[in-house]
Image (tube, rainbow, N blue to C red):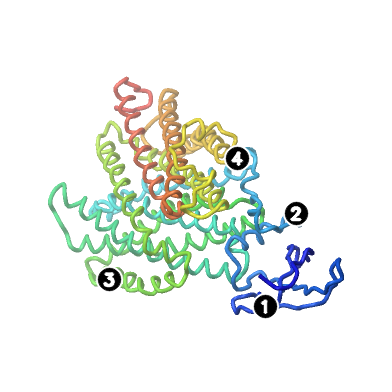
Amino acid sequence: MSSKPEQKEAHQANGAVLPAVPMDCLASPDRGQLVEPSGFLGPDGVGAEVVVLESRANAKGVREEDALLENGSQSNESDDTSTDRGPEPASPLKETSFSIGLQVLFPFLLAGFGTVAAGMVLDVVQHWDVFKYVTEVFILVPALLGLKGNLEMTLASRLSTAANIGQMDTPKELWKMITGNMALIQVQATVVGFLASIAAVIFGWIPDGHFSLDHAVLLCASSVATAFIASLVLGMIMIGVIIGSRKMGINPDNVATPIAASLGDLITLALLSGISWGLYKELESKAYVNPLVCAFFIALLPIWIIIAKRNAATREVLYSGWEPVIIAMAISSVGGLILDRTVSDPNFAGMAVFTPVINGVGGNLVAVQASRISTYLHMNGMPGESSEAAPRKCPSPCSTFFSSDVNSRSARVLFLLVVPGHLVFLYTISSMQGGHTTLTPIFIVFYMTAALLQVLILLYIADWMVHWMWGRDLDPDNFSIPYLTALGDLIGTGLLALSFHVLWLIGDRDSDVGD
């Protein structure tokens, strides 16, 4: 306590109300820059010292929540910025159902057409020699697409949250966030590509016990090279989308994850087909090319690890972000097993072209919802903090879909997009003569039932999982999306296979199911 009389006046500096404090309280070296004393007379005529603090946005010692307050102060809704008050809610929390639907609609359709295009590409390349003679590439496709999609959507979710809470507002912060996240996804993509190739080799070896070292190295080189190049391309696209969304006043959560998913499937499948075809041609004449390509990309790992470790935002993910990716791979593999067993039966060959669409749409919608809920929680605190925004109990379906909060509103909007979106995608497949199934009314009813049930389950699981992870001090941006998209693959494939089996049992001959 100071020996001087307590000052009653408060003086405003840079829009903040600051009480006058004695000079000896500012002698500590960890205080901000400086202070300028000046003399004033109080009501009783006693002289008082008034301290005017030089306000700097990035001054040493500014707390994280102060930075959020500074970011929110641009709204100019109030001049009172008392430290007892939290940051004003950002724009995503004030969105209407119409604005959410309008922002999500275009990237949702783009994502859907991307999955349709990926299915068409697979329909063409399945006749190439590399797919005929190195059949393990078929096993590699769903594993690599699923894992690659998880990495890109997780990146999009992380960057969207960072943009919404003001961590990418200055050029320095933006550059730091870009370099750290790009290095991180290169590490994850290389390791994930390698693991996916091992899984493909194992699943290809188990049925007949045949193992080819040349084919194993080919799979490794193709997978790692595809994952690395696709990560680089998609990462730069995501950064451009998120920066552009912020400048246009669009919530990045609504557009980044669907675009990442759509482009991820198409670009990754095209790269995998082209690279594996090229390496297969070199297999006989230049056998050293495949191991050289694999060794080159693996040798770059230490560089990306060093860069990612320098960024505090990506350092934690570098150490702890592997568990969801590996578990998601196992979940997706079960879905792939269902698909393999179903389409191997000639009666259900038409299921193949619809599987990427139903899985892609479900994964895209739940990724948007998970990213939005994560952003909402980040705006109200830090992971592990208990608050009204982060309930620990399992939510009821009514609170998930019928409450008045913004996350329930977005869940309703996303659910309502399922039927019109799938109708457009089914018409596109039919007009392009894809698949072996005619779109009869009863087929469309079964297909839509499976799609609606899939998205309904995923949105509810997302509401529970994101809050549960938040309560366990885990950042949902890094952990929830891999689980949710993998569950989307499993649930979508299972429900679609069940629909095809029921159609075959009831004898829907018009749709060619069972012929």
Sequence-wise, the earlier of marks 3 and 1 is 1
Q: Give the image location of residue 498, x and y in percent.
A: 32, 30
Secondary structure beneath label 3: helix
Which residue is more in the foreground, 200 or 275? 200
C-alpha span from label 3 to label 4: 49 Å
Sequence-wise, the earlier of marks 2 and 3 is 2
Q: Amino acid at mark 1?
A: Asp
Sequence-wise, the earlier of marks 3 and 4 is 4
Which residue is more in the foreground, 382 or 92? 382
Examine the image and state in which quarter residue 301 appears.
Answer: bottom left
User: Residue, x 57% and y 61% (percent of image)?
Assistant: 240
Residue pointed to by mark 1: 24
Using the image, determine if residue 172 lies above or below residue 483.
Answer: below
Residue pointed to by mark 2: 78
Whether residue 258 is visible here, answered yes or no, is: no
Q: Nearer the viewer, mark 2 or mark 1?
A: 1
Examine the image and state in which quarter residue 167 appears.
Answer: bottom right
Q: Amino acid at mark 2?
A: Ser
Contact check, label 4 and label 1, Cβ < 8 Å = no
Secondary structure beneath label 2: loop
The image's mark for residue 101 is 4
Mark 1 is surrounded, within 10 Å at the Cα level, by few (under 14), some (14 to 19) or many (20 or more) other residues, namely few
Whether residue 343 is visible here, answered yes or no, is: yes
